[in-house]
Image (spheres, rainbow, N blue to C red):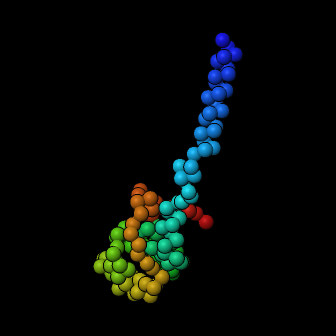
């Protein structure tokens, strides 16, 4: 009886292996993609105002952290010029206009905007 059971179990295992080998390739994912990496690649060297964290503004003198925080919390934006609708001082407007060509706007991604990650994304030097 034990031999019969062992023989049947080995047959089941062998059948399972054959089925996985014979399944068409479409049953498996063609390529695993990280949607967030694709989203970040959309901005191509520019800071995405709808999806960037405050720290991305450090490269622009005078914008980090005060103006960057206002921009991050004031979104989402339909265009780069929508930032000028925020309550900004004259100096902040001047700074934003100075660097405006370095910004872009793409639709917000939930994974990049939930929680407080845009204020403190945990990336430290």
Judge left or right: residue 15 versus residue 101.
right
Is residue 76 visible in this depiction of the protein?
Answer: yes
Q: Quadrant of the C terminus?
A: bottom right
In the image, farthest residue toward the top: 1
> Nearest the camera: 21 or 33?
21
Query: Picture quarter containing residue 113?
Result: bottom left
Task: Tell me: 19 left or right of 70.
Answer: right
**Which residue is drawn at the image coordinates 45% and 73% (left, top)?**
48
Image location of residue 54, percent across then percent down? 47, 69
What residue lies at 64% left-to-right and 24% top-to-bottom?
9
Asked if 32 appears above or below 50 in the picture, the reply is above
Residue in front for this viewpoint, 86 or 12: 12
Seen from the viewer's position, the closer of residues 104 and 3 is: 3
The front one of 114 and 10 is 10
Q: Quadrant of residue 97?
A: bottom left
Residue 60 position within the rendered picture, expressed as x and y whole percent measured from the top left: 51, 80
Say which residue appears at 43% left-offset and 68% top-offset: 51
Query: Would residue 28 be visible to someone looking at this image?
Result: no
Residue at the spot 61% in from the left edge and 44% down from the top edge:
22
Q: Is residue 18 left or right of residue 103?
A: right
Residue 43 in the image: x percent, y percent?
49, 75
Picture layout, residue 76 above or below residue 100: above
Quadrant position of the N terminus in the picture: top right
Residue 11 image point, x, y percent: 65, 27
């Amino acid at each position: 009886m034990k031999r019969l059971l062992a023989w049947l179990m080995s047959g089941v295992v062998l059948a399972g292996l054959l089925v996985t080998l014979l399944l068409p390739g479409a049953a498996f994912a063609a390529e695993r993609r990280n949607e967030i990496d694709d989203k970040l690649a959309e901005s191509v060297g520019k800071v995405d105002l709808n999806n960037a964290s405050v720290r991305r503004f450090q490269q622009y003198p005078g914008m980090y952290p005060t103006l960057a925080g206002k921009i991050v919390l004031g979104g989402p934006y339909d265009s780069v010029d929508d930032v000028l609708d925020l309550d900004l001082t004259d100096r902040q407007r001047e700074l934003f206009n100075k660097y405006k060509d370095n910004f872009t706007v793409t639709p917000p991604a939930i994974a990049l905007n939930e929680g407080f990650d845009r204020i403190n994304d945990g990336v430290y030097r």
